[in-house]
Amino acid sequence: MSIQRIAKQALSAYARSKSGARRTTATGMPTRNRPIRSKKIHRGRSAEGQIAAKAIRSLRKAF
């Protein structure tokens, strides 16, 4: 095998790996080991949950 042929194979393999992945980062590299999330992760409680808890607490105090 000539050096040119090896280089061509390596280049085509690299191009395949880049084009094969639809989900890519800003740099164009495929996100292999990264989980794909559609929704944001909620750390802590949401505003709705906090308001609901506050309402329940005030109701409990009233009775």
Image: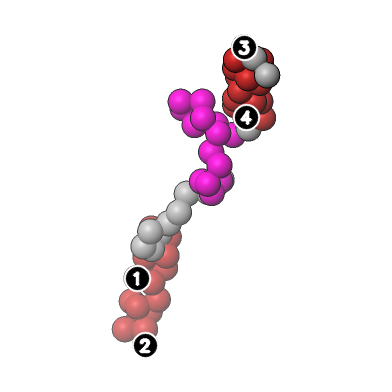
Report whether 49 appears left or right of 37.
left
Q: Of helix, strand and loop, which one carries label 1?
A: helix
Q: Nearer the viewer, mark 4 or mark 3?
A: 3
Is 25 a magenta residue? yes
Judged from the image, the secondary structure of the residue bearing numbered disc 4 is helix
Q: Which residue is mark 2?
A: 63
Give coordinates of residue 27: x percent, y percent: 46, 25
Q: Nearer the viewer, mark 1 or mark 2?
A: 1
Does the image show residue 44? yes
Q: Which residues are magenta?
A: 23-36
Residue type of the residue flagged with mark 4:
Ser
- How far apart, in angstroms, are the residues tagged by discs 4 and 1? 52 Å
What residue lies at 42% left-to-right and 65% top-to-bottom? 49
Whichever of labels 4 and 3 marks the residue nearer the N terminus, that label is 3
- The numbered mark, 4 or 1, whose residue comes first in the sequence reads 4
Which of the two labelled residues, at mark 3 and mark 1, occupies the earlier sequence position?
3
Q: Which mark is residue 17?
A: 4
Residue topped by disc 1: 54
Q: CA distance from mark 2 to mark 4?
A: 65 Å
Residue type pointed to by label 2: Phe
In this rendered view, identify the residue nearer to me: 8 or 30.
8
Secondary structure mostly taken by the magenta-highlighted segment of the chain = loop
Q: Nearer the viewer, mark 4 or mark 1?
A: 4
Q: Residues within 10 Å of mark 1 (few under 14, many from 20)?
A: few
* Magenta stretch contains residue 15: no
Residue shown at 33%/76% (left/top)?
Answer: 58
- Counting from the top left corner in percent of width and height, residue 57 is at 35, 78
Are dots 1 and 2 in contact, CB under 8 Å? no
How far separated are the C-alphas under marks 4 and 3?
Answer: 20 Å
Give, as a three-letter code, the residue at label 1.
Answer: Lys
Q: CA distance from mark 3 to mark 1?
A: 71 Å
Please tell me how crowded label 3 is: few (under 14), some (14-19), or many (20+) other residues with Cα within 10 Å: few
